[in-house]
Image: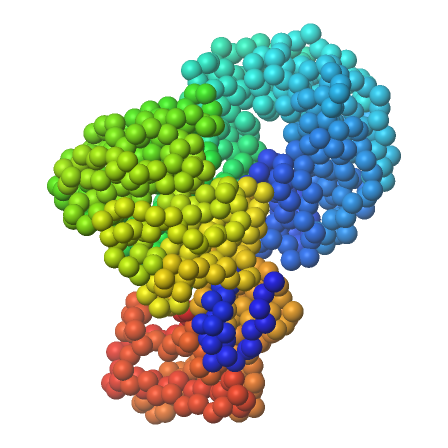
Amino acid sequence: MKTPILLTGLSLIASLAALAEFQVAWAEKIKGTTAIDSTSADVDDDGDLDVCLIHLVDEGTVLLNDGSGVFTQSPTAAPLPAAGAAQLGDLDGDGDPDLFLATHLGPCKVWLNDGSGNFSDSGQSISGSYSRVAVSLADLDGDNDLDVVLPANSPMSGSTVIYTEVWLNDGNGVFTDSGQQLGSAFAQSSTVFDVNGDTFPDIALSINGQNKLWINNGSGVFTLSATQLGGGTTFDIQFADLNGDTFPDAFVADGFNPPFADDNEVWFNDGNGTFTNSGQSLGDGYSFCVVLTDLDNDSDIDAVVGNNTTQPNEVWRNDGTGTFTLAPVTLGINNAIDIEAADFDGDNDTDFFLAINGYPSELWNRVPVNQGGPIKDSGQRFGSSSASCLAQGDFDGDNDIDIAMGNGGGIVRILRNNGAGQFRDTPNPLPNGFGNNNGAIGAGDFNGDNFIDLLVVNNPRGGNADLADRVWFNDGTGRFTMSPQLIGAENGGCVAIADVDGDNDLDAIVGNAPYGFGAGQNRIYRNDGTGTFTPYDALGTGNTRGIAVGLINNDAHVDIVVGSIDLPTTIWFGDGTGNFTDSGQSLGTGNTRAVLLGDFDGSPGLDVLCANSSGGSKLYTNSGSGTFTESAQVFTGNNTTSAAAFDLEGDTDLDLWFGRGFFSNPDQLWTNDGSGSFVLETPTYGSQTTEAVIAADFNGDGDMDIFVASQAGDHILWAQGAAAVQAYAESFGLTGTDTEPFEDPDLDGVSNYEEYAFNMNPNLADSAVIGNFATATKGLPVFRVEVNGSNRAFVAETIQRIGADVIDYRLEAATNLVFGAPPAGITVTSNPFNANYQRTTYRYDIPSPPPAHFGRFRVLYSP
């Protein structure tokens, strides 16, 4: 529960200093990490195509298109229930698209549209509780309404029976089981298409085994065809005339882990629904889906294939005869489990919405080659990722702190900070090998070029993981290139970066964390100064989850603390050349997920904090010579996964933030009195299954903020300097992420911080420009050129918040379109009209005789 905050600037700052209360300063706007399907239609009747994004476990989202291909979460639509698949179509005959949801392990649902993109449950429970990840809508029985095909890929609990069902629509969106049971097979997807030219839609089932084709007699009754259509681990089959003979051929997308071969295939149709394998083996990726469309405008059908994590999503070009070659164009490397192809930006070509599992979904646009085409990442992201680790650094050289976020699928996201603690994905995430998880990330200048590089330590996600750790070199702009060196083949669980051998370059200490509770050999990677590492065994064995580096025993050599979940924490003394000796000390009994070194008690020597998943975290104080004693401090609460030490209150002692995962426990803030005695502060923070935390000044206000990365994708920046805008938004009835500074909950094009700056209502669309400035109390500023004979001046009239430290009002002028700091000579006059706001005029007299001048008035969020 939030502590009440007064709206005056002084009272707010005092409240924060006294209570150390953090507010959410940034979070990913759309949640969820389990996207599995997307479907598009004009759901709000505004003439463009919108998207329903479906998640297997998380809530789904209705995304509204502004007509130019820019999507925002609908402010009025209810969250969509979790499902394995969904399709939009007019189910009840009222002219707007409704939503059929194929539920995973539950009855399927029909959600009806009110015509404005707001969906509600019709109350139907369709079919049994099968595992479903596909659904198809089509008029199967010729009565001019949409029926449904429901494949299943596992039986109901307690049963061994599995089959695909056909449910018929009565025209009003009410469905009845036709009683047909199409085979007994694990169907991954269904495709409805007239394959034999009789005008009736047939059904192709993608199966873990021999794929099946069912022929429609015209009344919605299906008979199994004897034709072959591939067999393997097929996830998708799509039909189009691929060889120019006017008959619909089949592109079969198969998935299988390397080194096993199960390549994608093309099957040619003889016109009667009999298919022959063309003999092509297209790619060796684990393919989930395929879209068939003419990408290169040569009047034949090409293919876009969605592949598994770290494998590029591919474009295959057709030569017109049905022979495909791989094009040098990709649609990213995140696993596109579904691709929706349509003209989303209104420019009369095909764009691609990628539903991505484990990472944010993406939109890719067709654009001219001279604009970055033929297919370009729009930069839009929808959803989140399942985080496993974090690193920080100014990766792009703009003097703020960015984030590298490791994830469960082996791809590192680079989140670029705009300087105000607002983060955005860079377009080139870092893949770290098929089958790998990111266990930890170390950041530092490994090759001596003064740019922050990354060492990504990996562990297995699947049986085909190479487990190799990878070095990524930064060019200084935040673009990374992978080193050809693959280091080690262990189960990396943690990493620390330091010069352990005294040769003035950064080495790495890697903790081995085998799956489960086995023990592995820890290692040191010695750097030759160019970013090439030589590994050697050191620091014992164990299931190591935390490593900390510092000067522990007062000999000026780097020492190391090793924390494990299966063994006590150990202390290793360095000799300055890269050799370490076990001090013989055993701290605690294990269950340690992270270790911190810091002066927690104000006495000489670095102390050790063991963040434990059970038994409570423990503090061990240093005698000054590297001998440790357990403190009497009791930290309540289990399930700690990570921790950060930082000076919260500016009193020079270290406070603690405990990130707690496992079952969505709230994070904890413990404040230190300077002697190593800690008090748990209230409130606790969130319930986001925290995996990693970093403390730093992300928004540039001089206070320490906390970046929290969540396994569930609820990544949050907790900041002390963001509360003014949020408190203002809360005063108008807004809650949660709708109060964040850069949100626009009333969809009037004015973000919350601007509403705060101009005394507007963030919960009401009121984006009007100031009319009569002499009497105005709110509104957007007026900016004009004032002419007096040969003299010219830029004049801005604005409503201004009094004492608003987080808002920067700026009149800028330049002789070209490259604006810098406001010029000298600006005059400012203000007239307060209440305790919080004033009318302010900014004036800049342009030098005479003037060169060409450009001017603008801006309001920046600058906490």
Residue 264 to residue 360: above or below: above
Residue drawn at the location 25% of the way across and 35% of the way down: 582
Residue 73 in percent (x, y) is at 60, 53
* Residue 405 visible to the viewer: no
Residue drawn at the location 21% of the way across and 35% of the way down: 580
Q: Nearer the viewer, residue 269 or 394?
A: 394
Q: Is residue 770 left or right of residue 821?
A: right
Q: Nearer the viewer, residue 498 or 45?
A: 498
Q: Nearer the viewer, residue 199 or 540?
A: 540
Residue 250 in percent (x, y) is at 58, 19
In the figure, residue 841 lies in which quadrant? bottom left
Residue 229 in percent (x, y) is at 61, 13
Residue drawn at the location 42% of the way across and 15% of the way down: 259
Residue 186 to residue 807: above or below: above
Residue drawn at the location 61% of the way across and 16% of the way down: 208
Q: Is residue 379 left or right of residue 552?
A: right
Furthest toward the top, the residue is 226
* Residue 159 visible to the viewer: yes
Q: Is residue 113 left or right of residue 554?
A: right
Residue 308 to residue 557: above or below: above
Residue 681 to residue 91: above or below: below
